[in-house]
Amino acid sequence: MKALSIRSPWWWAILEAGKDIENRDWSTNFRGRFLIHVGKWFKEDEIMEDLDVIRRIRNLDEPAEDAAKQLKPYGGCIVGSVEIVDCVTESTSPWFFGKYGFVLRNPVTFDKPVPRKGALGFFEVEW
């Protein structure tokens, strides 16, 4: 099955906060369900800035510091899946701020994270 590595906290926003666009600087013709792999990259100050963006978009009250601590253990794991239904260069979604946006639907959060090695772009995972 295809997988895509997504940095913290954006994977969480897809699975739990209604993020319906994954921003990339490259397009894709792929349509269908893929696994969400959490990249191991974790730079707390940048994650805090990204969490502030998420909080503004969603009007969330949770302190960013608490959310950042909860995200760190998921690096290097597959945590859920979501469907790509389109790839766009324009969108009215508040989540769109990239060159290309993968339009996402039907996120599923897994009960337990599954450790797996990631890669750049879409990659195949035995599932």
Image (tube, rainbow, N blue to C red):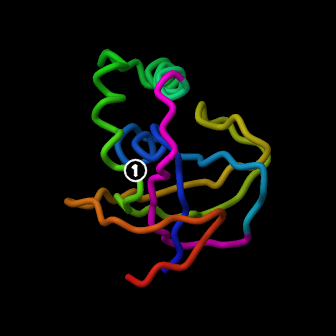
At x 77%, y 60%, the residue is 27
Relative vertical location of residue 95 with respect to residue 78 in this rendering, above or below: above
Circle 1: residue type = Gly
**Which residue is nearer to you in this view: 40 or 90?**
40
Percent x, y of residue 20: 53, 46
Q: Quadrant of residue 108?
A: bottom left
Residue 51 rendering spot, x and y as whole percentages? 46, 25
Relative horizontal placement of residue 93, taking residue 69 as reference (left or right): right
- Indicate the position of residue 46 as horizontal and vertical percent values: 55, 26
Q: Residue at x 27, y 61 (%)?
A: 110
Stretch in magenta:
29-45
Q: Where, by quadrant of the figure, is residue 103 drawn?
A: bottom right
Instruction: Characterize the local packing of mark 1: few (<14), some (14-19) or many (20 or more) Cα atoms within 10 angstroms.
Output: many
User: Residue 86's x, y, as percent?
Assistant: 66, 61
Name the residue that disc number 1 marks.
75
34 drawn magenta: yes
